[in-house]
Amino acid sequence: DAGVIQSPRHEVTEMGQEVTLRCKPISGHDYLFWYRQTMMRGLELLIYFNNNVPIDDSGMPEDRFSAKMPNASFSTLKIQPSEPRDSAVYFCASSFARDEQYFGPGTRLTVT
Amino acid sequence: GNSVTQMEGPVTLSEEAFLTINCTYTATGYPSLFWYVQYPGEGLQLLLKATKADDKGSNKGFEATYRKETTSFHLEKGSVQVSDSAVYFCALNQAGTALIFGKGTTLSVSS
C-alpha cells in the first residue's frame, strides 16, 4: 500500500488567497483526520471523519477553514481566505476502526 | 477530560546512553496507549502501542509498559543511537474519541 498520500507537499501563497490541501487515505480505512502542527501550538486535531461523515470539527479554528470528504478515497481541507497565521504543516491521517493512525508526509503551508 | 502529559524537552544524550521519556495520562476507563515518532521533515509513525494494563509495547529497541496504577506509559531504550534523534509523541485512544496527543519531546543524540 502507498500509505496516506497528501498533496501538495509544499504550498506558498499570498495572504487572501484560497488554499486547498488534498488527502488520499489508505484503502479500507474508515476514519480520516486532519491535523495542524506548529512550533507554538504543537499538534492540533482540526477535524475527523468516519465513513465520510464529519464527526468532530471543534478543532477547526474559524469559518475560514472547511473540510470535505466526498468519498472514501479523498478529502480536502480548504482555507479561504488564507492568513499568515495559517502557516503550518498540515497532516492527514487515516485509521481503521479507531486503531492506530497512519500519517501522511504533510503539507507545509506558507502564507506571506 | 482525557489528556496526556509528556516531559518537556529537549532531551540531549550521547550515543549509547539510556533513554527515558515520561508520559502520564488522564482518562476514564481503559484507553489504548501509543508512542509515535516524527523524524525531521516527515509525518508521525507509530512506534509502539499497548492496549491494556501491564501490556508492554516494544519496537526497534524501545519499550513502554502500560501502568494503570500510576497512569503512566514511559518510553525507554537501553542504548540510543544518533538515528533515534526525533520528536516523540505519547498518545491515548479511548472509545468515542480521536487520538489525544501529548506536546511531544524532542530527542537529540550526539556521537
Image (tube, rainbow, N blue to C red):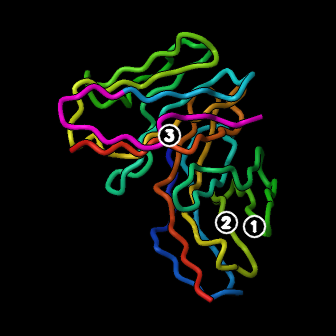
Which of discs 1 and 3 lies nearer the camera? The answer is: 3
**Closest to the observer, B28 or A83:** A83
Mark 2 near mark 1, Cβ–Cβ under 8 Å?
yes
Instruction: Pick the quarter of the image with the C terminus of chain B.
Output: bottom right
Q: Tag on residue B75?
A: 2
Q: Position of residue A43 (x, y in %)?
A: 44, 47
Mark 3 near mark 2, Cβ–Cβ under 8 Å?
no
The residue that label 3 is drawn on is A91
Say if B50 sits above or below A21 in the image: below
Q: CA distance from mark 1 to mark 3?
A: 25 Å
Which of discs 3 and 2 lies nearer the camera? The answer is: 3
Residue at the (69%, 83%) spot, across then down: B18
Say if A10 sits above or below A5 in the image: below
Kind of residue at badge 3:
Phe
Q: CA distance from mark 3 to mark 2?
A: 24 Å
Q: Are marks 2 and 1 in one subunit?
A: yes
- Give left or right: position of B111 versus B108: right
The segment highlighted magenta reads A1-19
Residue lying furthest left in this view?
Answer: A16
Residue at the (77%, 34%) spot, across then down: A1
Q: Residues within 10 Å of mark 2 (few under 14, many from 20)?
A: many
Q: Tag on residue B62?
A: 1
Q: Position of residue B66 (x, y in %)?
A: 73, 55
